[in-house]
Image (spheres, grey):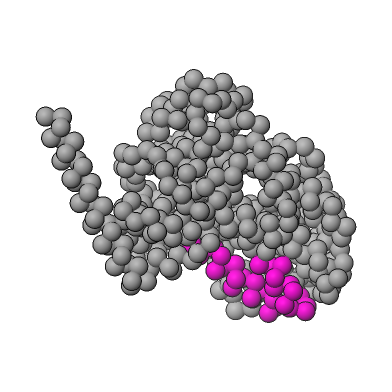
Amino acid sequence: MADMIGKRAVVVGGGIAGLTAARALADRFEEVVVLDRDELPDEVEPRKGVPQGHHAHTLMAGGRRALEELFPGLDAELVEAGAVDLDHGLGISTARFGRVGSHWTAGVHMMSASRPLVETSIRRRVRAVESVRLRTGVAVSGLVGEDGRVTGVSLDDGEVIEADLVVDCTGRGTRSNHWLAALGLAVPESVEVKAGVGYASRLYRRTDLVEPKIAFAVPVAPAEFRAGLMLPIEGDRWLVSLSGWHDRFPHDDEEFESHAASLPHPAIREVVSTGEPLTGISVIRFPASRRRYFERLRRSPAGFLTLGDAVCSFNPIYGQGMSCAAMAAAELRRLLGVHGAVTPELSTEYYRRVAGILATPWRFATGGDYRYPQTEGRRPRGIRLTNAYTMLILLACSADEDLRRTYVSVQHLLLDSAVLRTPTMALRVLRRALQAARRSRRQAAAAKSSSS
C-alpha cells in the first residue's frame, strides 16, 4: 500500500478532470471527496452541467495513454462499448487546400467516442475505488483557510468540509480567483483569446454508405471560417459537429444543412443531406480560450491545485481538453508519489509540469485562432512567423512521410513542439516544402494542359 500524505482531499467538480484527479489522489489520501452540482447519471447520457457533452470529442494518443495509466484496462472497455480506435493516418479523411483524403499509416492511434461514454466509463471506475466518495447535488461557495493555506471548502448550505488538499476541477467557469482573493491569496494572471467560436451538432444513424472514419473539413484562414467534423461513435452513429470562427456557425436546422452543403468534404455533405437524423441540433457558443498562469506566481497557494479547464480552456475545435486533463492528472499522481506532504513546493512543481503539458496544445490552438484578424487578445510576439512556419510544415508533410509522423505525434501530445523548431528540422521543412510546391505547380500545369 502506498504511503498516505493526508487524511482527506476534496475535488470540486465531477467531470472528466475531477474524476481523473480523484483517481490520482486516491492512493495518497485516506479519503477523497468529489463534489458536483449535478446528479451524476449511471447511464451514458449528456448532463446539464456539461453542455459540451452533445458535441464532438476525441481522445488523442497522449490522453489515451494517460487514462490507461490511471485506469488500466479502460481503453479496451471503451472499445468494447463501441468507441472507435483509429490510426491518425488511415482513420481521418481531411478536406483542406482543395484536397480530400488520407491514405497512409501514422502509427498514432486516437479514439472516437461520445463525451458521455468516456465520462460515464471513468465515473464507474472511480466509484469502484473504496477511498473515493462522490457527493452530488451540492454547490461549493468558497474556500476556507488560514495562514496562507487552503484548509477546505464551504458549501452553499454553510457546511464546511476540511481537507489537506483541495483541487478545483470546475471548468472554464471556475470561481477560484474570487475564492483565493477572499482569503488574501495570490491570484494568477490570465490570458483570453476571443475567437467567437460556436458549434451545432446532431447525431445520425451510421450505415455502410460512408466509410467509418473521421471526416474533417478544415477552413483555410483568414478567408474561410466554416469547419465540420464527423465522428463515428458508439451505437453505430455519426456525431456531426459543424462549427466556425467569429459567429460563422449554424444556429438552426436550416443553417445546419446549408453549412454542411458549403463544406468541401463529400462525406459530411452526404450524411447531412441523406442520412437519418437521430436528434435535433444542439448549439453551444465558446467565446474565448482562457489560460491561467499559476506557474508564474512567486508562491503557489498551499493546499490548493487546479486541473483541467479551470487552468486552461481551449477552443474545442482542436479537441485537446480531455487529453490534457488526463495527462495533468497522471502527472499529479506521479508527483504525489515523490512528495511526502502537501507543501507549497508540491504546488510549484505541479504547475511547472502542467505548464509543460499545456505549452504545445496552447500554441497550436491560439496560433490557429490568431490567423483571423478578427480574433481579440494579446498576440504573442512572433505569432505571424510561427503561423507561417506551421503552414510550411503542413506543405512539407505532403512530401515527407516521416516528417508527417513527427508532426502528428506533436499534435497528439506525444512529443513537444520544440522538435519541430530545431535548426536541422527547419532546414528539412524548408527543403520539403519547396519540393511539394514544385510538384504542385507541375501537377497544375499538367492538368491545365490536358484540359486545353
Whether the magenta-drawn stretch holds residue 51 is answered as no
The quadrant where residue 258 appears: top left
Q: Position of residue 140 (x, y in %)?
A: 77, 55
Examine the rendered structure and indicate whether residue 12 appears above or below residue 230: below
In the picture provided, is 285 more to the left or to the right than 28? left
Whether the magenta-drawn stretch holds residue 334 is answered as yes
Span colored in magenta: 331-360
Quarter of the picture holding the C terminus = top left
Query: As rendered, which of 226 and 432 lies closer to the eye?
Result: 432
Q: Position of residue 371 (x, y in %)?
A: 36, 52
The quadrant where residue 10 appears: bottom right
Q: Residue at x 69, y 48 (%)?
A: 76
Query: As rendered, which of 351 and 287 lies closer to the eye?
Result: 351
Q: Residue at x 57, y 27 (%)?
A: 206
In the picture provided, is 432 more to the left or to the right than 123? left
Examine the rendered structure and indicate whether residue 377 appears above or below residue 56: below
